[in-house]
Amino acid sequence: MAAWRERLAGVRGVLLDISGVLYDSGEGGGKPIAGSVEAVARLKRSGLKVRFCTNESQKSRRRLVGELRRLGFDIHEGEVTAPPPAACQVLKERGLRPHLLVHDEVRSEFDQIDTSNPNCVVIADAGESFSYQNMNKAFQVLMGLDKPVLISLGKGRYYKMTSGLMLDVGGYMKALEYACGVEAEVVGKPSPEFFKSALQEMGLEACQAAEWQLPVPNAPSPCHRPSKMFASVTRSRTCGHFKAVFQHEVLSDELRLTPVAVAPCPRCFVS
């Protein structure tokens, strides 16, 4: 334990993923992963800065935080970095008017955005709204633009709910990329800019933060790629405890993993 603390002596804050790390979403608000409520509470008592980073794009931050609070988590809306607000900032800065292919639950996040005469497409985890008709409309908008812009809120392949694995936005994003000959701009993980915005909210540098996250089963690397020079702790697929600490470097599409420590779960780290 002493060696573990020494190796992460420079860490001043923790970025926590939500889905699959703190809880599995589903009917009735989902269910917390064993020990996660206590882990968050202990992290906050430890004096570390804590921020929650999520690619959740089927729920507004208010609804997500409400569900987590009902499950017992100490979390507030202002502590959550999520793709919809970040995307709105990008749209405003660049004068973009989106055609929205998003879940009805998050449309309210774009209420202050001009959506008339679209000059880009924003795609998110739209759930049942991923119909042929809606995908084809997004395709038509992109094909009608001289300089098509496709913005994707995350690029995950799938995620876990209490009812099983669910297809995520990444597959639909790739379909539009292929059909339109464009490359999507990702707002959310694994975009380095997304992590930088979270760090700015915390007032920390990348070398001062650690991120707890969950690897995709059978994947060679974690599904959520932190930006360059993050210390990241991934949860073991077998026992559920947090085992390996990696230093991540994202170079174009490559992820370099350098093991730097072996760690207990966060409950032990802050005990």
Image (cartoon, rainbow, N blue to C red):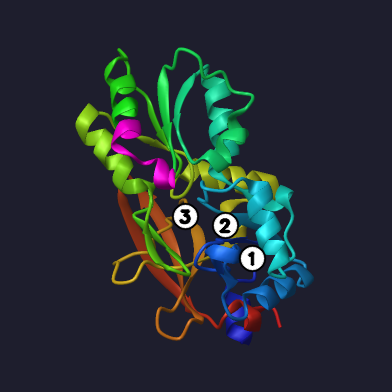
Seen at 73% across and 75% down, the residue is: 42
Q: Which residues are magenta?
A: 125-135
Secondary-structure class at tag 1: loop
Residue occupied by mark 3: 226
Quarter of the image holding residue 236? Answer: bottom left
Q: Nearer the viewer, residue 247 or 70?
A: 70
Q: Quadrant of the C terminus?
A: bottom right
Whether residue 24 appears in magenta in the rendering, the answer is no
Residue occupied by mark 1: 10
Secondary-structure class at tag 3: loop
Seen at 48% across and 56% down, the residue is: 229
Q: Earlier in the sequence, mark 3 or mark 2?
A: 2
Residue 207 image label:
2
* Amino acid type shown at disc 2: Cys
Residue 218 point in image, percent of width and height? 29, 71
Residue 92 point in image, percent of width and height? 58, 22
Q: Nearer the viewer, residue 222 or 97?
A: 97
* Amino acid type shown at disc 3: Pro
Residue 72 point in image, percent of width and height? 72, 70
User: Is residue 204 at all visible to an observer of this figure?
Assistant: no
Q: CA distance from mark 3 to mark 2?
A: 12 Å
* Amino acid type shown at disc 1: Gly
Q: CA distance from mark 1 to mark 2?
A: 8 Å
Q: Is residue 146 above or below residue 26?
A: above
Seen at 45% across and 12% down, the residue is: 117
Q: Earlier in the sequence, mark 1 or mark 2?
A: 1
